Amino acid sequence: MNPLFVKVHGNDNVAIIVNPEGVAPGARFANGLTAAEAIPQSHKITLTPLAAGAPIIRYGEVIGHLLSGVDAGRWIREDLLTLPAAPLLDQLQLATRKFAPPEPLIGYTFDGYRNADGSVGTRNMLGITTTVQCVAPTVEYAVRRIEAEILPKYPNVDGVVAVTHSYGCGVAIDAPGARIPIATLGHISRHANIAGDPLVVSLGCEKMQPGRLLPFFEPNVIRLQDNRGFAATVSAICEQAEKRLVELNKRRRAAVPASELNVGLQCGGSDAFSGVTCNPAVGFFADLLVRAGGTILFSEVTEVRDAVHLLTPRCADEATARKLIAEMLWYDEYLAKGGADRSANTTPGNKRGGLANIVEKALGSVAKAGSGPIQHVATHGEKVTAKGLVFAATPASDFICGTQQLASMNLHVFTTGEGTPYGLAMVPVAKVSSRTALAEKWPDLIDIDAGTIATGSQTIEEVGWQLFHYLLDVASGRKKTWAEQWRLHNALAPFNPGPVT
Ligand code: CA
């Protein structure tokens, strides 16, 4: 491959190296620029000479200022840059962007499971939820037995999922922060993919009693401290499970409009390509699904914070913009209480992948949110029922964000540059790579390769449409994602900002 860089915005004074092996000193690009030193793939090269103090501009935005002057063709690393201050939250434009009504996208459907509460599942599973970590190994034991001995008799059921977690006791359950994990687990326990109707296993003495987990629901509860012993308890769970499996097995998929998709978007192991390839392609998909009437959730507060000035103008009204600002402020204060700030977000892998700092990472991350208006802002633990583009506040931690999004989503799209095998038991997780090198290295983990956008062999629009069609197939059960095939099920990790006792 000839030396190749990709520049995103007309005002950018740096570009990203595309060549998988990087470029050598003296490498000459098509526009006449010469690399002044060896620069690895996905790292930044200066396009012009720049003086000390000059802004480094990527995505048309300032990602830092130079500590000393550099020539054209130099490698811009994290240690050459200062970190700009985060956008001031009291100086943002609120709902100032005007949007033409989106052109409706009609006629797209998928085969889903319509539930009694109106929600639509993309899978037909038996859910066994738990009120406390104490019962998790017992439930997991019972699930292994159900899968081996009972489930094969009910071929229309896709699986059995144990909603196990680390919450439920030993916590200040009346503290304000407790609302978040309790609400999150409550919504997951009534997920569309388990028909909104779980079995509940409780210990008996725990703080999060079944009525607290599911306040508006009369579940079938098996209480361990009421049963005789381990074997009797497992038998009780298996017996109740079989009764549910008989009912679930009668369900059939039926065509429903694409507007019934609630897709959670997340990125993990991001690199400097994420904001050029996979995230813009997912953003194009997000615009398509919104046009089809569906719901898109984007999240990860610390990866939005430094790009919030680009998002508050896009809110549908001022009240929504103020909610977005309130979520940023809450998280600033949460981090400050822990002696940290948003710069704590970036990982060694992000930096190896060419991301200098959280500003550059955030600008790439928000590309997932497409180009349309933000219709609703949901706080931590809120179940999203709005249609359109929604900011659902979560931490950026992959497994915590995924757990919170799970409360509302029936499909999950995960973009990655460095690579992660992440998956969830309850919803299909489709993984989109930022680079072709990752898709080639992990052909049995990456579902869609967006690296083709950097080399010019596919456009953002083409990959976005490819993802749209692929997800309709996955939602219909016609295709399984790699994470589903290998049964890669990350543990649920509810966000608990409240005290542990
Ligand atoms: Ca993440």
Image: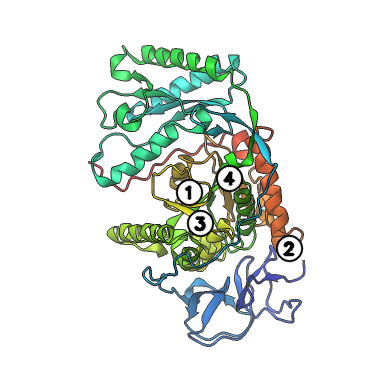
Q: Earlier in the sequence, mark 1 or mark 3?
A: 3
For the residue carrying disc 2, how many other residues have a C-alpha within 10 Å: few (<14), some (14-19), or many (20+)?
A: some
Left or right: 371, with 493 as reference point: right
Measure the C-alpha gap from mark 4 to mark 1: 23 Å
Residue type beneath disc 1? Asp
**Image quarter of the C terminus:** top left
Marks 2/4: CA–CA distance: 31 Å
Q: For this view, does 7 lie left or right of residue 127?
A: right
Sequence-first tag of 2 and 1:
1
Query: What residue appears at the point 39 percent right and 24 percent down from the top-left corner?
Result: 200
- Residue on which disc 1 sits: 398
Sequence order check: which comes first, mark 2 or mark 3? 3
Residue position for label 4: 294
- Identify the residue at horizontal 58%, vertical 52% (top origin): 415
Question: Which residue is disc 3 drawn over?
Answer: 374
For the residues labelled 4 and 1, say whether their Cβ atoms are less than 8 Å apart.
no
| Direction from residue 198 to residue 275 in the image, left or right | right
Ligand 1 lies under 8 Å from the Cβ of mark 2: no
The structure residue drawn at horizontal position 70% and vertical position 81%, both measured from the top left corner, is: 33
Q: Position of residue 326 (x, y in %)?
A: 36, 59
Q: Is residue 161 above or below residue 373?
A: above
* Tag in front: 1 or 3: 3
